[in-house]
Structures are given as structure tokens and as C-alpha cells.
Amino acid sequence: MERLTRTMIRYRWAVVAVWAVIVVASVMAMSGLADLLTNRFSLPGTDTARAETILEQHFGQRTTGSFSLVVQGPPASAERLVPIVRERATKAAAELPTGKLAGVQAVSDSVVTATIVSNLEPADAKGYTDEMRAAAGQIPGAKVYVSGQAAIEHDLDPVFSHDLKVGELFIAIPIALLILAFVFGTLAFLIPFMFSAAAIPATLSIVWIFAHFMELTTYLQNLVMLIGLGIAIDYSLLIVYRYREELRKDQDKEAAIVRTMQTAGRAVVFSGSAVGVGLALMLFMPLPFMRGFGIGGFAIPIVSIICALTLLPVLLYFLGAKLDRVRLVPKRVLERRDAEYNFWMRLARTIQRRPVFFAVGTSALLLALASPVFALELGPGSNKGIPQDLEGVQGLNVISDAVGEGALAPTAIVGNTGRPGGVDSTAARAAIGELITRLRQDPEVAAVVFDESRQHVDPTKRYFHIEVIGKSEYGSPAALDFVDRLRDDIIPAAGFPDDVRVYAGGGPPSGVDFLDVTYGAFPWLVLGVLLLTYILLLRAFRSLLLPLKAILLNLLSIAAAFGLLVIFFKWGGAGALGLISFDQIEGWIPVFIFAMVFGLSMDYEVFLVSRMREEWDAGKPNDEAVAIGLAKTGRIVTAAGLVMFAAFMGFVAGSIVGLQQFGFGLAVAILLDVTLVRALLVPSAMELFGRWNWWLPSGVARVLRVKPSPLARRSRPAMSPSGR
């Protein structure tokens, strides 16, 4: 580390030039990134995917890329409106590439719907929504809506954009500025923003490269900016603060930077690796859109480590002392905060006098918060969790009132008889009839649509398509339960010949497949992450016990965050905060929260325990090492956590329940971690473990190629009544 740091300082102008080129090139690449990102969502290897393939190749449509033209007139006007709706729907379909009018029907005495299908993905189809609305026009005496999944996605895009901008520009960044200005007390707080101005564009340029070869989600850009800002602040906080400390000991600027990088820089390398392991979890998820988040999540800490080891020492050399001379907080306040016996030292001494009380009390509180996790109800999402004043949603609600909530995303039962003309065989016809009869008897089915049209039987008569409209919305428990009955009982009982393959896709089945695929792989990937993290921290802390303690405490804080999600969104606590109460937690949220919080929590753990390890290696007894480590890093860890808390609360300020749940879960997990876990539970546990904290047998040390840490006995200095 010393050689690398001195090299960076020696060639500091070259380092600045290289990073300037990287930033300029990255900003140029970022300008074209949005066009490469997509909202495509696929479920490879599932019945949903098989049904979608048949629908696209043989029926020229996708269940998720269709539109509904909804017209609501006065009572008893439906029959009069049908020909007018057919004319307007034909014009609207002409604006959609591969679009065709599948059918027009009166669904009540005042509501007429027209279905327009295409073989486009929703991400592609939604771009034609405005043109279709213009072509459909208005009908005198009636209300006209263009709805469907693609239209709703189109209407949601500006809502997402507005919510995320408000969260970033009016919540996350201003609060981060205030916290950093207060913590640093000088203009040195600008260094973290210089760091992030280099690291974030560089990370997005990597995303830009991968976006040419794989499907990456639209919201990856916001994730990279959010997490990138937090990690950049974390790493620069740790290093700049340590540089200040070293500079007070040694007035030689270069020597102080070298010592800083040997200590805090080393911690950043291990911390970034731990974050990368946690976020890389999503690289191995079987769903493409999650793997896309894994690309960005893995790139963020890697780029941040490189930036911290190369650019940050140069920024400290050029600007560190100069910016530190411009005070924003009075000198006496800074001196009192930086004194060895500060608030964090007093807190550590208080905890060490009653370690059992703090350990048991804090653990009990976290377990109590985590207990509602057993009531966690996962779902694939819901249109009820989005703003109801959008035209697409208003049209959906009109259909729902007339037919059933499942009308917008119906189940698509697709059959392959294996040969041309197979649909007309006696056995196939009998089985289709039996299937339709059983479907109509199911309490969840509102309507079954099947006829001899091109949309239900392909020209070769090898494939058939039955549309099932449910009474409940596609993501509701009733709709998901129906899928289980459909696949396990109704379709097998219809009596199809052995050579006929029948697949259930579309709305509710896609939700079931999403949850099954996600949580079939998730537990095994979590186990792999825990194992890799243990090995990494084993090497970083040179301890058998501390990595295990870190993992268990992280899992406890994440479980508490999941429990709070249930309390606030399912049990009604959200209403008190002005949020949207909702029974289900969207299925992707626990996966993302685990990956992000596990990584970021390890960030704080490495910051804290590395400094404690440093004091132990310097000859301090356990209680002194723990107390000094907390005194030196407590404020840094808390400030970094509060910055991330503010950033995540930016999601909560939005109007979409999924993002509210996501932001709330992340925010409370980080808040619990930097308060209850890092400030109370870690020091109390380490006081109880004593010298066992630092034990690493020589055999294990040889395997890890690190210095062993014997089980040493050290005298404990007497404390004065004040705790000093």
C-alpha cells in the first residue's frame, strides 16, 4: 500500500489527467445510456415463458404488450357504441407496429372494450401510447381511455422520474451536504463529492458497456447513482478523517497520507470487497433483470476502491489541508469533538460497565422488531399500489368495475397439440370443452374467452389460446391461489391427450413463476454470500469469532427491517407517516434489501472493527481497543449511515408503493444498523467475548496467508469512577 500511495503522489498530475479523461469519456457514454436500458421482464425456463413464446410466434401477440381501448357511456348505450369503438380501435391499432384489433365487446350495458394486440414487449409498445390515444380521439357523450400494461407503464414513467428527482435533489443531496458539513466542520466536506463525481460516472460507463450485450433495467442508473453516492461518502469520510488524525501527529503531508492509506485505505479495500460480495448476489439470480442490478452493484464498490486508492490520495495532497483551513464550525467545537474522551468514548465505557444489559436488551428489541417477519406476505406487485389518477389506471378501474379486476392482465392458457389440425381432433376438442367448463365453475373466474378467431386458434390449427379473466387482480392472493388450482387440478382434469402440451401464462401465472424462480434460488445464494463474507472478514479481522458475529448481527438487523415492513405496510403503521398501506410486500424487495443492506452493513462493520483491531495490535487490552475504536470511528459510521438513510428516504417520498416499501426497508435497516447494532450491540458483545475476539490460530492463519493472532492475555487498566 505504501508503494502504491507514494507512486500516486509522485505522478499526481498524471493521475488527475487520467481521471479527467475517464470522467469526460464516462459522461459522454452516460448521455446514451438511457436509450440502452429497458423495462423488459422475462422468466426464462417457466411455463409463462413457454406460453409467451407460442403467443408471439404463432398468434402475433404478447399478453403484456397489448392495449385496451375502454369506452364508458351512459346506461344502455353499449350496443350503440360497439361500431364506433371498433372504428376508433382500428385507427389506434394502426399506430402500433404489428398491432391488430383482436376483438370488441360490450362488457356491461354502458362499457365497451376493444383489445389491441401486438408482438411487442411493453417497453417497446408503451412508446406508441400517445399516438394511439390521439388516433382514438374522443366520443361525444362517452369517456375514452387507452389502458393496458404498456399504457400504464407509459403513464408511470414520468411519475418514476419525478419521484426519483425529488428524492435525490430535495432530500438525499441537501441532507448529505448538511451532515457532511457538520461532521467535517470545514470545507473538506467537498472532497467526498469530488470523489463521487469521478466514481459514479466511471461506474455508469461500465454499465453502458454491458448494456450493449445484455438487458439492463431502466432503474439501474438511479441505483448506481444512489449507492455510488453513499459508498463514495463512506470511503472518503473514513480516509479524510484518518488523514486529519495522522496530520496532527506528523506535519509531513506525504507521510500522513501514506499512513492513512496503510490503515484506512486497507479498511476500504476489505470494505469494498465485502460490499461487492453482497451486491454480487444478484449476479447469480436466475432472472435477467436482477442480474442487471448485480452488474451495477458489483461495479460500484470495485470502481470506488480503485478511485480511493488512486485519486483520493492525490486530492488529499492537493486540497486536504487547504480545505481544512476554512472552518464551518467553531474551532473549539471541533477540538471538543475530536478529543480522545468524546461522546463515543463515554458511550463505550458505559456499555462496558453493563455489557450483559446492553447486549441482552438490544438483542431483545431487535428480535421483537423482527418477529412480524413471519407474517410477511410476498406478491408480484399490484396496480393498486400506483397513482390512481393516471388515464391507464382509470381505464383499468372501469373494466374492473364492469368485469373483474383481472381483466387487464388475464391468464393465457396456451396449448400445443403437436401437429397441424390437432385442435380439431375429437380428443382435443373434448378436453378444451371440459377445461372451459371447469374454468367457469371456479369461484375466481369472471369470464372465459375462446372462439375460432385468429386470436384463439392459429391458422394451422396446431395451437389454441384460451383467455381467462379473473375476479381479482393478477397479484392478489386469490389470483395466485387460482394459478395453483389451474396447474395442479383444472388442466390435468380436463383430460388432454398425452402428446398435447398446455401452459398457463399471462398475468397471475407470471406472478407465481416470478416468486417461485426468485425464492427457489435465493436461499442458496444467500448461503454462498454468507460463506464468502465469512472468509473475507476472517482475513480482514484476523479472527475466527468476529466475522461470525458480524454476519449474525447483520442478519438480525435485516430481519428487524423486514419485520418493520410488515408493521408499517401490512398492519397499518404506514398511514401515520402518510404512506400507502398494503398487505403484500413486492417479491423483489426482500432480495434487493438483503443484498444492499448486507453489503453496506459490512461497510460499517469493517470501518469499526478494523480500527479496534489496529488498537489491539498496538498492545491495548480488549476494552481499551474496543472503546478507542468506537471513539475514533463512531461519528464517521453514524454520519455515513445517516447520509444513506436520507438517500433511501428519497424513495419513500414517492407515490408508488413498491418504491415506498423499498426505500423504507433500506432506510430503517441502515438506521437500526448504525444505532442499535454498531453503537450498542457490537461493543457490548465484544466486551463479553474479551480476548477471544482477536484469536486466529496459526494453522488457519497459514491457510489465509495472514499473521496469526494468539489468544493473548493483557492486563486491564483500572478505570477511574468517571470511566477514564
Image (spheres, grey):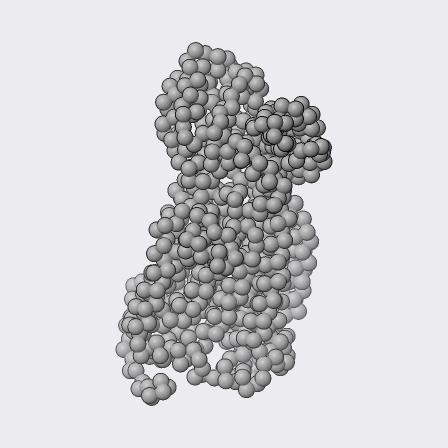
- Name the outermost residue toward the bottom: 720
Q: Nearer the viewer, residue 694 or 658?
A: 658
What x and y, as percent, mark residue 226?
Answer: 56, 58
- Is 271 positioned to the left or the right of 104 in the image? left
**Snapshot quadrant of residue 182:** bottom right
Question: Total label count?
Answer: 0
Would you say residue 108 is visible in this rendering? yes
**Residue at the image point whose x is 58% and y is 27% from the top:** 109
What x and y, as percent, mark residue 282?
Answer: 47, 49
Q: Nearer the viewer, residue 402 or 74?
A: 74
Q: Is residue 114 above or below residue 554?
A: above
Q: Quadrant of the C terminus?
A: bottom left
Q: Is residue 243 above or below residue 552?
A: below
Would you say residue 591 is visible in this rendering? no
Q: Is residue 545 above or below residue 215?
A: below
Q: Nearer the viewer, residue 694 or 581?
A: 581
What x and y, as percent, mark residue 290?
Answer: 50, 46
**Residue at the image point whose x is 69% and y is 53% from the top:** 28
**Snapshot quadrant of residue 181:** bottom right
- Name the outermost residue toward the top: 426
What x and y, as percent, mark residue 387?
Answer: 58, 47
- Is 372 positioned to the left or the right of 424 in the image? left
**Residue at the image point whose x is 35% and y is 85% from the top:** 723
**Residue at the image point whose x is 50% and y is 59% from the top:** 577
